[in-house]
Amino acid sequence: MTFQSLPKIELHLHLEGGAPPAFIAGLAREKRIDLSGIFDAQGNYTYRDFDHFLKVYEAACTTLQTPEDFRRLTLAVLEESAANGVVYSETFLSPDFCGGGDLAAWRDYLAAIQDAAEEAERTMGITLRGIVTCIRHFGPEQAKTAAMCAAETRGDFITGFGMAGAEKVGRPKDYAYSFDMAREAGLRITCHAGEWGGPDMVADTIRDLAPERIGHGVNAIHDLALVDRIAEAGIVLEVCPGSNVFLGATGGWRDHPIAELHRRGVKVTVSTDDPPFFGTTMSTEYEMLHRAFDWDEGMFRDLNTVALDAAFCDAATRDRIAKLLEA
Ligand code: ADE
Ligand code: ZN
């Protein structure tokens, strides 16, 4: 069975993490940056574990130096998403990688990304929204700069604020100031938690940062009372099964907690995270979930309805995308 043409919603995609390796290698050649260590003989990204993945990711980001680089990146990423049936996508954007946290520079990068998003909507029929994301291992002070950039550019395109990066660094409350600033500016909130941290990290994130969605959240499965609380609160999990399996955050596909979380009433959604880093696409995610749990088209349509409900977009956009999901 192939799910390529099924219309899809993706809520959890890091823009730089969607960069095809050939795209990054091309930029590195143009700019004479030596990145040979991050690619294998086939030209794919290579790394040993999650910490090394973050280093390789950041090395790849050193090639992305101008708004024009991000314009081209956005088009390349959206082309791949659209080819896999994605009609609406939310992407994590980090001022840290777009001008180093300088607000004027961030505005220039954002204009270029938005320009590409508008072109993709016209030519490929895919709609994009941006979630400004601070990087946890860059620390709470830099997170405030990201939150300030988010607050200053909140609008039709930048609709959310979140946090990615090394979950073992610090505790959620260390970042509460930034999340409060973003929330007060009207941004919707998501946060990575429970990918590498245990259920206590998920619980602390809910208590201290009050997200309406959680990136991953799969380790909540080790505390069933917490799973019940997440279900009752209607908190949506942005689950990225292929990422978890590839990085070893969970066991294999058949052991992945997404099915049990869903059975227990949690609102789960499916995303790719950093697709070329994990050899995945949205179609592959659906195909693997079909093989592991016998999930069928009806199930995926239901999950996409949950995802659209949880999307950080306005009502008019939601209504327009809902019609596309009926196709
Ligand atoms: N940044 C990019 N991918 C990530 C992941 N899977 N977890 C945390 N931060 C990330
Ligand atoms: Zn992620």
Image (cartoon, rainbow, N blue to C red):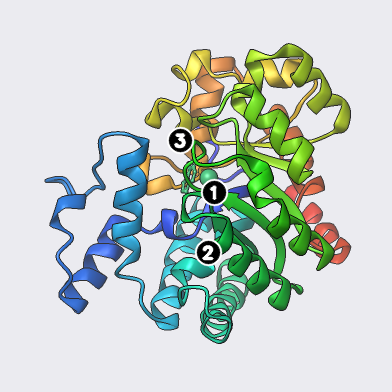
Asked if the residue under mark 1 is in contact with the one under mark 3, i.e. CB atoms within 8 Å, the reply is: no
Nearest to N terminus: mark 2 or mark 3 = 2
Query: x and y percent of residue 21 in the render?
Result: 28, 56
Query: x and y percent of residue 162 in the render?
Result: 64, 53
User: Mark 3 falls on what kind of element?
Assistant: helix
Whether disc 1's CB lies below 8 Å from ligand 1 is answered yes
**Residue placed most toward the observer, 39 or 4:** 39
**Three-letter code, disc 2:** Ser
Nearest to N terminus: mark 2 or mark 1 = 2
User: Mark 2 falls on what kind of element?
Assistant: loop
**Residue placed most toward the observer, 205 or 118:** 205
Q: On the rendered structure, is 153 left or right of 212? A: left
Whether disc 3's CB lies below 8 Å from ligand 1 is answered yes
Q: Residue at x 35, y 57 (%)?
A: 58
For the question of whether residue 147 can be seen, the reply is: yes
Q: On the rendered structure, is 61 left or right of 313? A: left
Instruction: Give the number of the mark in front: 3 or 1.
Output: 1
What whole-number distance in Å separates the C-alpha atoms at marks 2 and 1?
9 Å
Query: Would you identify the image quadrant in which residue 104 lies?
Result: bottom right
The residue wearing badge 1 is 164
**Three-letter code, disc 1:** Ala
Query: Would you identify the image quadrant in which residue 123 lies?
Result: bottom right
What whole-number distance in Å separates the C-alpha atoms at marks 2 and 3?
20 Å
User: Mark 1 falls on what kind of element?
Assistant: strand
**Three-letter code, disc 3:** Ser
The residue wearing badge 3 is 243
Query: x and y percent of residue 291 in the render?
Result: 50, 19
Query: Would you identify the image quadrant in which residue 122 lies?
Result: bottom right
Instruction: Give the number of the mark in front: 2 or 3.
Output: 2
Nearest to N terminus: mark 3 or mark 1 = 1
Residue 94 bears which disc, if any?
2
Asked if the residue under mark 3 is in contact with the one under mark 2, i.e. CB atoms within 8 Å, the reply is: no
